[in-house]
Amino acid sequence: MTASTGAQSADVVFSGVEGSFSYRVPHMLASAVQVGMRVLVPFGHRRLTGVVVSVESEPNPKATRNIEHILDEQPAFSPPLLRFTQWISEYYLCPWGDVLKAALPAGIALDEKRHWAAGGASEAEIERFAAEYPHSLALIEALRNGPVTQQRMTKQYGLARSAALLKRMQEAGLIEFRPVLQPPRVKSHFDSVVTLAPAVYDRFGPELLTSLRSVHEQQILREIFESGPEGVLRSDMLKGASSGRRQAFTRLLGNGSLELRVEEVSRWDPFAENIPDVHEPETLTEYQQAAVSAISTAVEQQRFMPFLLFGVTGSGKTQVYIEAVRRTLEKGRTSLVLLPEIALTPFVWARFFRAFGDRVAIQHSAQSPAVRYDLWRAIRAGRYPVVVGARSAVFAPLERLGLVVVDEEQEASFKQEDTPPRYHARDAALMRAHMENAAIVLGSATPSAESYHHALNGRYTMLQLPERVGGASSPIVRIVMWKAKPKPEPEAEPDTKKSKKRAPAEELPILTDELKSAAGEILERGKQAIFLQNRRGFSPFLVCTHCGKVPVCPDCSVSLTYHRKGLALRCHYCDHREHAPDTCPRCGSAEWAAQGLGTQRLEEELAVCFPTARILRMDSDTASRRGMHGRMVSAFAAGEYDFLVGTQMIAKGLDFPLVELAAVVQADTELFYPDFRASERGASLILQVAGRAGRRETTGSVVIQTAVPDHPVLQTAATGKWDELLHRELAQREQGGYPPFSRLVLIRAMHREESAAVRVLLRLRRILQQNGGVNVLGPAPAVVNRIRGQYRYQMLVRTSRRDDAAGNRLRDMVRQALMELKRTKNESQAIIEVDVDPQSVV
């Protein structure tokens, strides 16, 4: 896959399409087309943007159509990055084009879509048709203003593609359904840079300024002179300017005192990011120095070396990353730092920014498409040798990669699960480091069972940070058992409803006396506390106290979550929303009980118990707006709030110096999930949130509320002995045949008819079992059996790692089975999803 100066044909891949397609290269493009470039080509009855993955100097007889346009001045993908994306495609069983699309900024494709447009009919013909069909007038007027998409046609005018009116208008020549090329939504941004003319720059001084006509002219020249030879953006200089300032600028430009040059300008302003004030120890501990030395040696030797940095919370893992990156830069190589949560990205980026200034870029999905595009171009051009970002930053176009860091490597959010490519960023980062001879550090206070197993077996080098930095001690953990309290008897009601009334049950208090006491003490001392409740909303569901009716989603097999704000019921799977009913639709009762606990309800309870407390809630409801994560973290770090309530986004990687209490309000919700990783994940989350407390001189405290205080996961949280839990987990997984002792592929089928989803999986199971060599479990219904009206059934296919170390045989058999299924008649048209190395099997 190398560039050719005399290309005759090229292989191109597309998003959503398996395989590559050969195209002729016209003579005028033969010297310009290169591997990794995006091109516009005809595909079927339309034109699409594809990526060139190989070129040939000889004509290919399979190539019958020409490449029309080259869309890049230089390749969008370097050869190493192209090989990396190809590996992801092959490993995760998805089209190569899907991976390439995921690696590019959104909104830059030039694709063709069919639209309804005005035809060649005369005005007289249009008037005659409108007279016969008056209801077509609105559509005719809309088409005069430009093409109309079929989506708009259906939504605004109620006309499907096969509507009789559209057919009549087509036959009369009034409209055409023709292709329209869609321009990219995101383009480079250009602006004028203002500088002083050389003669003015040489004469600049008090004498020159006093000779000017107005104060505005003096201010403008002074501002530009002080900015240096780089100049000032015209848009910045005139933003919000008065008419006098604008007139002065025009005069200076007209008399030659100012010069303009047009430049491409980045829309990313690093100083607009929230930069929390972070305490950084001046020196590294002995353990930190040893870790940095080992990592730096691997970088210097330019060889692939995976490290597992196992450090307790507060042990200074980020400092190790920063120092290792510093030494990597000294060797002239670049660094990539991956984080699991968008909430963490601005916070960690700020620490790197303090260390390396504007040599660090940040990448995450909360940025605008324009900013992401500008950063991608700047990284590709070598402007930023250090990139800090979330999962998708694994595709950052860095050259000369020397070091990769995956912080909180155990986090399931590193796995892309919703849409293809369903890659795991940690595992993909390992392969990218391997391909580019880079060192890679997997850091965590609670490493995954897989990574810990690889370290024990010598595949990874383990580096340990067993102590907190700065003399801080581990927090004191208290496991508090919930004690149920009887509900108060309701007031007497009419006899018509007494017969339906259920006996009052006992309920668990939201906050135990122990937690209230600890929180009150923190408040009195002017310190801070964080409260973890890993469920947003007010309560998971409402229930009628008379008949037991629970409002459920009409399209998903789940109850609707109650949100107190707006008195709304929402489905957290399909986002269906409706108002909370005043009366029960089944029995007519007006009494509803909110069952379970969400972050909204916890926030409200804390406000009642502590009226003077300043409370901040951080979950996907409050932090969904762009930049809100960073602003919330900065505000809490600055001491503007006393209590922080949130979901798992508050549990990891954040360093708040005033936090001395961490509370897990409802630990039991993390313990009994029907998944083989449930214990590991529950313990990890609890230990991580516990690690936020007491990270300075004062010993912190942790309160864990539970109904099962003897659970092994909670005992691990109390002792902090993560390695003991992993040894127990590994023994159980080896016995059950789960990773890291096996390879897994999850196949899910979805269809509006339940039987159709089951049938397609049964057919796949027969194909797999005929070939032999794999263990097939299922099909079985998913835990959430229906989402968005689609029934969901799944099947787990696995092989032993002892016989199939890399999983090649498993993936080949699944790939062949899917191909055979496509060759047979699939009357059900079920949607099939394939998840290699699934992080959840429910």
Image: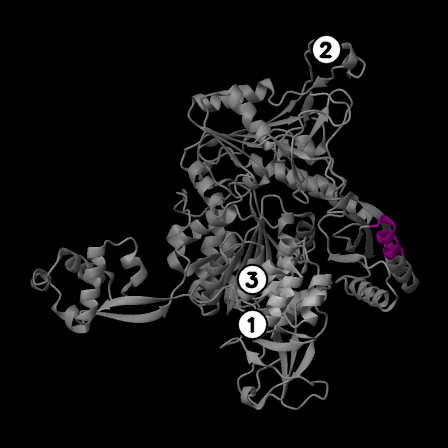
Decide: is 177 above or below 494.
below
Q: Which mark is residue 493?
A: 2
> Please, which colouring scheme is shown?
one colour
Q: Which residue is mark 3?
A: 141
Q: Is residue 511 left or right of residue 768?
A: left
Q: Report crowding for label 2: few under 14, some 14 to 19, many 20 or more residues within 10 A (C-alpha).
A: few
> Three-letter amino acid code at disc 3?
Glu
Q: Earlier in the sequence, mark 3 or mark 1?
A: 1
Horizontal and vertical percent for residue 190?
38, 67
Q: Which quadrant, please, contains the C terminus?
A: top right
Front residue of 559 and 159: 159
Q: Which mark is residue 77?
A: 1
Q: Which quadrant, please, contains the N terminus?
A: bottom right
Q: Report crowding for label 1: few under 14, some 14 to 19, many 20 or more residues within 10 A (C-alpha).
A: many
Range covered by the magenta-colored residues: 753-762
Magenta span main SS: helix
